[in-house]
Image (cartoon, helix red, strand yellow):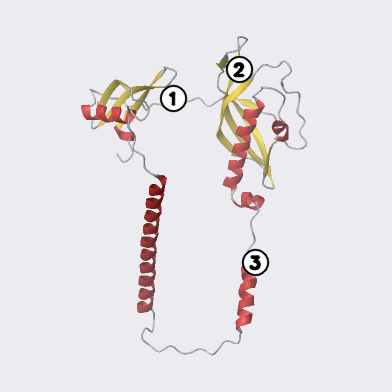
Amino acid sequence: MDEYEEIPWTTLLTEHRHGRAKTLYMAAAVIVAVVIGFVGIRWLTAPGHGEQPVLAAPAETTTSEAVVTEVESSTTTAVLSEADLMAAVPAVAELAAVARAEWFVTDYFTVDGPIPEELISAFVNDATIPDLPNGDGAGISYVEWARAFDVRPTNSGYVISVVFRSLTEEPDGAFVRGPVRAVDVLIAVEDGETAVAELPIPILPPVYHAIDGWMVTNGEAHDDAITATLDYAGMFDENAEVIESGAAGPEWRVVFSVGDRSGNRWPVVMRSDTIPGS
């Protein structure tokens, strides 16, 4: 029978708080020391050091006037709205457009009942939308995933290229994964809001078949590398199995398999040149 050691959460919380307090005290001490040193250096190197300062004539501005001026200046800072922020920081608008495009593609190509209101409201207000498939006799289709892979700015917003894959229901009730497809989505951005400005535009998905870069090895990896791999693999599957191993000079590569509750196993790899801190 396995035995587990229980540690009271109150003990962990107390130690955590003490550690944070100690860290804060040390940080404060370092900051104070830096400030004192900086001020001292400025004082020692300032022109006319050691001379008696000439007293300036008393300012005519009264204390009350100074307070009023300070209050007035502090109230002039404007609070940025979401629209101002998106106009000032294009990256925010771009991220919002990407999120809208991925969300839209997921809803548009998913059919599992009546057309959701979220899909209709995603379009610009004056959109003319043709009939879309709905729950009345339509087949069931789910978008498994949708990811943007290209963003191009326009005068009114962005064109977002989205790649996605759908799962469709077969007559026997089983679901089949379809091919990867891609569309361009025109997103309008205005006053901090985003909307879909056109129906999806089919495009070819990105395909990369002209890239080389597989790690080539000669000979076997040393025993320490295999042991380290199995120790690491235990975090994913305690029954990990080494399939093959190899070395390329001082570097090594070990292929091993991991599984899940389905009983399936997948080959994965551990490489010395990808270990953090190596």
Q: Residue at x 41, y 48 (%)?
A: 10
- Comes first in the chain, label 3 or label 1: 3
Residue density around tag 2, few if under 14, some if 14–19, many if 20 or more, within 10 Å = many
**Amino acid type assigned to the residue bearing label 3 in the image:** Thr
Of mark 2 and mark 3, the one earlier in the sequence is: 3
Asked where in the image residue 232 lies, by quadrant, the reply is top left
**Which residue is tagged 3?**
76
- Distance of mark 3 from mark 1, alpha carbons? 58 Å
Q: Is residue 196 above or below residue 18?
A: above
Pick the front one: 76 or 154: 76
Report x, y in % for residue 217.
Answer: 27, 25
What's under tag 1, amino acid-wise? Ala
User: Which comes sooner in the sequence, label 2 or label 1?
Assistant: 2
Image marks 2 and 3: residues in contact by CB distance under 8 Å: no
Query: Which quarter of the rendering shows the N terminus?
Result: top left
Horizontal side of 147 relative to 81 (left or right) equals: left
Q: Is residue 212 above or below residue 159?
A: above
Q: Residue at x 39, y 51 (%)?
A: 16
Nearer to us of marks 3 and 1 is: 3
Horizontal and vertical percent position of residue 164: 57, 26
Q: Please name whichever residue, 225 or 4, is drawn nearer the observer in this view of the structure.
A: 4
State the quadrant of the C terminus.
top left
Q: Which mark is residue 168?
A: 2
Q: Which mark is residue 210?
A: 1
Give the crowd class for mark 1: few <14, some 14-19, many >=20 residues within 10 Å: few
Residue at 39% x, 64% y: name it: 28
Choose top left, top right, bottom left or bottom right for residue 6.
top left
Query: Residue 222: in sight, yes or no?
Result: no
Q: Residue furthest top?
A: 172
- Please indicate whether residue 253 sits to the left or right of residue 86 in the image: left
